[in-house]
Amino acid sequence: EDQVTQSPEALRLQEGESSSLNCSYTVSGLRGLFWYRQDPGKGPEFLFTLYSAGEEKEKERLKATLTKKESFLHITAPKPEDSATYLCAVQGQAGTALIFGKGTTLSVSS
Amino acid sequence: GAGVSQSPSNKVTEKGKDVELRCDPISGHTALYWYRQSLGQGLEFLIYFQGNSAPDKSGLPSDRFSAERTGGSVSTLTIQRTQQEDSAVYLCASSPRTGVNNSPLHFGNGTRLTVT
């Protein structure tokens, strides 16, 4: 069964304090791993898609990396506006739906 | 154009009543998904449409839940005889085609359903 586990559940950082969020997954044939950002009261907003181990993608202060078992979302010098819940999802060969983790809620204080 | 639109944004209903939730996907997107997000839980897949057909209904939790899509566009999720455990945010997403390579899901802001 495809499964996604995110850690930590919550993370509090000071502005400028870099850190990483983890997404561990088990899937039968990875078709894609996705990172989304979700603000309170809003739907998830797409950030990145990663397809194969070793792949990396960057957007502003965010960098996503992928191995065969996990993905990391690295946040460099975060700002308060980076505060949100970050969701990881996978799609396997067997299904059409994305399987989501429970998310990491990031709070960045100034 | 506009993103995925869902209505109503909030719905409060009494236990036992039926509710209909609406989703307007991005124009031209053939794939449409319904997810449910409960407090402290991840997004739970409900149903997937490709065009007007639903090849994957595996996530619908019971026969009280049904969904349809007409004209390859608007979709309606219906919950009959609502129960308190149905309280959640119901999210709709669309993508240009099935198979998500280079086709991420675009989500609406959801309908928050509260069953009293």
Image (tube, coloured by chain):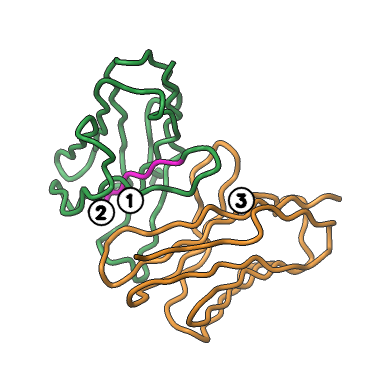
Chain colours: A orange, B green
What residue sits right under mark 1 in the picture?
B94
Q: Is residue A82 magenta?
A: no
Residue at 44 percent across and 33 percent down: it is B88
Cα separation, mark 3 vs mark 2, equals 25 Å
Residue at 39 percent across and 61 percent down: it is B104
Dot 3 and dot 1 residues touching (CB under 8 Å): no
Q: What chain letter is assigned to the residue under label 3?
A: A
Element type at mark 1: strand
Numbered badge on residue A85: 3
- Magenta stretch? B30-37
Between residue A3 and residue A79, name the one nearer to us.
A3
Circle 2 residues within 10 Å: few <14, some 14–19, many ≥20: many
| For residue B23, side relative to residue B69 (left or right) | right
Cα separation, mark 1 vs mark 2, equals 5 Å
Dot 1 and dot 2 residues touching (CB under 8 Å): yes
Cα separation, mark 3 vs mark 1, equals 21 Å
Please name the amino acid that badge 3 sits on.
Thr
Q: What chain letter is assigned to the residue under label 1?
A: B
| For residue B53, side relative to residue A69 (left or right) | left
